[in-house]
Amino acid sequence: MTDSIQVQLRKGVLDLCVLAVLSRGESYGYEIASTLVAAVGMGEGTIYPLMRRMQNDGLVATRIVESSNGPPRKYYRLTPLGRSIFEAHRRDWRTLAGSVDKLLEDLP
């Protein structure tokens, strides 16, 4: 049961985590995935469909950059809409996390 809760929590905040990574600057898919694996344990397979959806929703823009040591890389960056959504989600997360922390602290 605990594993299921952790998976659901991670899935629930994955959008916010990707937006947070991109708020620091543009990044390519594997780099985003590696950051999220290290930070919250989300696998690479979940990132690419999410990135496509975010692009379709206008939250991220992309550009292709040739690589000297492999295939071209697709770089993602926040659009103005993506930055606005990130700021709103970050505020919502902080409010929710603070409320949950308070509930957990108040337990006997």
Image (spheres, rainbow, N blue to C red):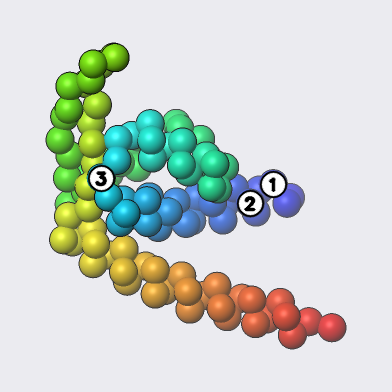
- Please identify the quarter of the rendering in which residue 91 is found: bottom left
Q: Is 108 situated above or below 16?
A: below
Dot 3 falls on a residue whose secondary structure is: loop
Cα distance in 3D space between marks 2 and 3: 28 Å
Residue 46 in sight from this viewpoint: no
Give the label on residue 26, or none. 3
Q: Nearer the viewer, residue 97 or 26?
A: 26
The answer to whether mark 2 and mark 1 are in CB contact below 8 A is yes
Where on the picture, by quarter, is residue 23? Answer: bottom left
| Residue shown at the point (38%, 40%) measured from the top left | 32
Q: Amino acid at mark 3?
A: Glu
Give the side of residue 28 with respect to residue 104, left or right.
left
Q: What amino acid is labelled 1 in the image?
A: Asp
Q: Residue at x 55, y 48 (%)?
A: 40
- List the residue tagged with mark 1: 3
Asked whether, in this view, residue 105 is left or right of residue 44, the answer is right
In the rendered image, residue 87, in percent from the top left (x then y), is placed at 31, 69
Q: Which label was assigned to residue 54?
A: none
Q: Mark 2 sits on what residue?
A: 6
Q: Residues within 10 Å of mark 3 (few under 14, many from 20)?
A: some
**Residue 81, above or below 15:** below
Query: Please, is residue 65 above or below residue 83 in the view?
Result: above
